[in-house]
Image: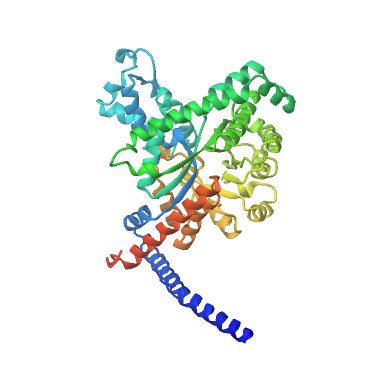
Amino acid sequence: MFTRALAVAALTSQLTVTAFAAPLPQQAVRQDNAGAATARRLAAIRDQPLLLRAFLREMPKGGDLHSHLTGAVYAESYLRWAAEDNLCLATTTMTIVAGTCDAQAGRPPMTLVLQNAALYSQAIDAMSMRNWNPAASGHDHFFAAFAKFGPAATRTGDMLAEVASRAASEHVSYLEVMLSPAATTAAQFARDIGWDSDLARFQDRLLAAGFREAVRTEARQRLDGAETRQREVLRCASAQPDPGCTTTIRYVSQVLRGAPPQRVFADILAGFELATFDPRVISINLVQAEDDPTAVRDFSLHMSMIDFLHVRYPRVPITLHAGELIEGLVPPEALRSHVRQSIETGHARRIGHGIDLMDEDDPLRLLRGLAAKNVLIETALTSNEQILGVAGKRHPLALYLKYGVPVALVTDDLGVSRSSHTQEFQKAVEDQGLDYPTLKRLVRNSLEYAFADPTTKKRLQADLEGAFSVFEQRMSQSSAPIPAR
């Protein structure tokens, strides 16, 4: 009887579970059908740029893991803020400057520049890749733009508000933004103490001088103030907040790789300290042109610094610019190992760009290693084309995907590039031939490989899947015919 009762109970339980579970396969089938219909729609419009752009703008895009804050802001904003702050424009260099303005001396007040259409347009062109002449060096024009923002690039809260609002409008839910939360303090300590090639002793001297508390204090004050201003600009406490209020932002502490060794080490140490202390700071990265002569000369030294500090701060994840180079830009020797060193010595879990992959020693083995270690490549198609002239079949994106290396699309410096989140996806379709399932995988990667804390990541991933469900249902139910070409 007992055995029979157990059998009946088991059967009843099985029927109950089956009854409750029955709708789930149907729901999954509906979602799969919607996904397939969405994929067919993209395939049908991939050669129709306007329809493709509208499709991609509405598509959920997850996170942008590689965004320089100063480069993400459009020049128009810098010029407007400069006018509000009574700054001037040095017309010989098209640089925003402080001090006494004098139009006759070539330093008109920015308020007058905003009223002069020709001068205003010239300033925008100088501070971005707009109307850039492809016959000139895109690399040089791009990097020169950053020096022209001047004191207008100190309005961190306004800058965060702009990038957060733009991300939300393009269905990007998460940003990892590169900035310098404690640059002033790190620079001061580096100057005061000076270089010491014994890294352990150098770290001890910095910490003994009060470095830890000083960088934490500066970063806390700067980030708190910037986020307060960001919320004010976006009206986050109002009845009609900007959608950017929902954008989750985390910070990557940037290191100026063209600086003297003592400054580089101090910046790296500051980043590790902040990522340990403040949950808003989640990683470090080396910035500035990788072909800068100091950056090339000291590349291995910088990796050894990161290696040294990684042992002391093992929980801090690392992302590094590496391989943002091409043949002819630097001597061949500089192309042979930057990506590999960044992973093996720099402990990078993500690589920014990785363009010179096939110039590295044993590149196919490197590809397999990237896939085996799940090292994600942050791919910035617009930036790679403008700075390095690498696009289409010359871009290694297809190789990364072929070898199973995880990839996410990123914007890099969308303000300077005059790009958008949507444009990066459009380039992926038009120039790289990616289909909808591949785009969807890259979007999921952007959150899977994010450095946000597990709770935040889980929330973002759940929201993303919900957004995909809504998007695909809408695309599959659309009755609008697709116009013939």
Residue 460 at what x, y percent from top left? 47, 51
Nearest the viewer among 355 and 25 is: 25
Q: Which residue of the protein is positioned furthest toward the front in this rendering?
A: 1
- Say which residue appears at 27% left-offset and 26% top-offset: 114
Residue 139 drawn above or below residue 449: above
Q: Is residue 158 visible?
A: no
What scheme was used to colour the molecule? rainbow
What number of labels is visible?
A: 0
Residue 305 at what x, y percent from top left? 68, 32
Residue 338 drawn above or below residue 408: above
- Say which residue appears at 39% left-offset and 65% top-offset: 38
- Decide if residue 80 is on the left or right side of residue 406: left
Q: Is residue 114 visible?
A: yes
- Say which residue appears at 71% left-offset and 22% top-offset: 196
Nearest the viewer among 411 and 454 is: 454
Nearest the viewer among 207 and 192 is: 207
Quadrant into which the N terminus falls = bottom right
Nearest the viewer among 108 and 413 is: 413
Residue 299 at what x, y percent from top left? 66, 34
Quadrant into which the C terminus falls = bottom left
Residue 247 at what x, y percent from top left? 41, 44
Residue 417 drawn above or below residue 28: above
- Decide if residue 6 is on the left or right side of residue 432: right
